[in-house]
Image (cartoon, rainbow, N blue to C red):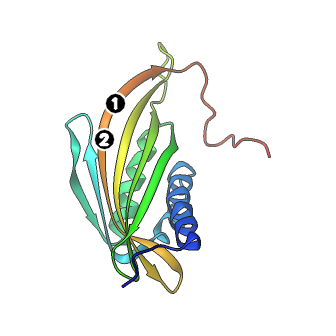
Amino acid sequence: MTDELSTADRLDLAQLTSLYAAAVDGRDWDALGTLFVADAVLVTADPPRSLHPGLEASGIDAIVAAARQLTAYARTFHHLTGSFWTPDGPSVALGRTTCAAHHVEAPDTSARSRSFVWHVIYADQAVRTDLGWRFARRELTVAMVEARPLSLVLPYDAPPST
């Protein structure tokens, strides 16, 4: 058992968390599914009912179905604020990732949009596979929620120019 993660491992694990955010925000459900091992578990909170992890999805199909529920929002935007990883054996790493996850409500005819910002703490377990590091378990705790008014929101059918 190694007591260290290599620099390459740390970069790959940081990339894994970034790819998760990009897949969710881009609503790329196929890409999201590739970031988990077949028997992975995603445990999410259920704001405002609960900020603690409690809703469990097991297996890639269930994880993707759980993530698809975010399509109820006009847009999501995950701003990763930090991540660190420690080894838990030669092919397992435990991590903590924090982010501010914006959940933009669709505007109605009488009001502007709001973003519900979930300040999230992910407790992660990743495993090394033949395809690289993949999530085996993600547990999402929401530390706090704030509501922010928005003036403009770019809809998903109008991607940013490159």
Q: Quadrant of residue 28?
A: bottom right
- For label 1, the residue is 145
Percent of width and height locating residue 115: 46, 28
Q: Quadrant of residue 155?
A: top right
Question: Quick check: 29 above or below 147?
Answer: below
User: Residue shown at 37%/26% (left/top)?
Assistant: 146
- Most extreme residue toward the right, as rendered? 162
Percent of width and height locating residue 96: 38, 55
Near mark 2 (Cα within 10 A), the count class, few <14, some 14-19 or many ≥20, is many
> Seen in the image, is 138 located left or right of residue 5?
left
Which mark identifies residue 158? none
Tags 2 and 1 in contact by the CB under 8 Å rule? yes
- Most extreme residue toward the front, as rendered? 3
Q: Amino acid at mark 1?
A: Val
Question: Quick check: 84 above or below 34?
Answer: above
User: Residue shown at 30%/37% (left/top)?
Assistant: 143
> Seen in the image, is 108 located left or right of residue 38?
right
Local SS, label 2:
strand
- For label 2, the residue is 142
Q: Amino acid at mark 2?
A: Val
Percent of width and height locating residue 152: 61, 23
Q: Nearer the viewer, residue 100 or 105?
A: 100
